[in-house]
Image (cartoon, rainbow, N blue to C red):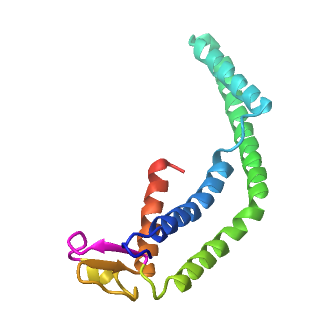
Amino acid sequence: MDDDGSSLAAPTIFILVALLQFIPRYFEHQIRNGGATSAEEKKLRAEIKQLLKEAGSLTQPSTFAQAAKLRRTAAAKEKELAKYQEQQMLERKSSYDPYMKYVTPVKALSYLLLGVWFWKYPVAAISKEILQPFGKMLSWKSGGSSEEKVMIGIVPWLVLCTRVSKLICRKVNI
């Protein structure tokens, strides 16, 4: 912490924690929605659309059997499309699995190292008026004390950063 009370530790820790929250969500997003639609998928969608369009145009009682057959064919094509999409998702999942298995240990190790590094030192100093009811709780294990400022400890700061970054990831829909 600098002599004037300002520190880059708090924003740096927030950015690190936000990245640690964003990376696994990005991988999950890529597994679910990643990749462009393939030619086979586009072809199946076009065939389904065409079959349903033809079945919708056959509204006469004499063409009911033909319309039902077209709808059944479209339903079979939809099942084929769903199976193809599931296969593609499994392929994407297998390509991200080597990275996903390291995300949780890296996150835990990062939190542990930050906790050890900042255990006795305050992460930030904030005016007492701003944190009036929560000052004691946020200064837990921060070490230093001051009359006009509350020294924020690493444990409450990590909890706060984790909650805020999860909220941001949820709002961004990642």
- Determine if residue 1 is in view: yes
Query: Would you place residue 16 above or below residue 145 in this image?
Result: above
Q: Position of residue 58 (x, y in %)?
A: 61, 13
- Determine if residue 69 is in view: no
Q: Give yes or no for residue 59 being in the magenta stretch.
A: no
Which residue occupies the foreground of this view, 114 or 77? 114
What is the quadrant of residue 95 in the picture?
bottom right
Which residue occupies the foreground of this view, 52 or 115? 115
Which residue occupies the foreground of this view, 2 or 108? 2
The stretch in magenta equals: 123-133
Residue occupying image coordinates x 65% and y 22%: 49
Taking 91 as reference, is 128 left or right? left
Residue occupying image coordinates x 60% and y 77%: 108
What is the quadrant of residue 47 in the picture?
top right
Dominant secondary structure of the residues highlighted in magenta in the image: loop
Q: Position of residue 149 (x, y in %)?
A: 28, 77
Taking 142 as reference, is 126 left or right? left
Number of labelled discs?
0
Query: Would you place residue 18 above or below residue 60 in this image?
Result: below
Taking 3 as reference, is 47 left or right? right
Taking 23 as reference, is 37 left or right? right
Residue occupying image coordinates x 69% and y 23%: 70
Where does the N terminus fall, quadrant-wise? bottom left
Which residue occupies the foreground of this view, 165 or 145? 145
Q: Position of residue 163 (x, y in %)?
A: 43, 66
Q: Position of residue 25 (x, y in %)?
A: 59, 57
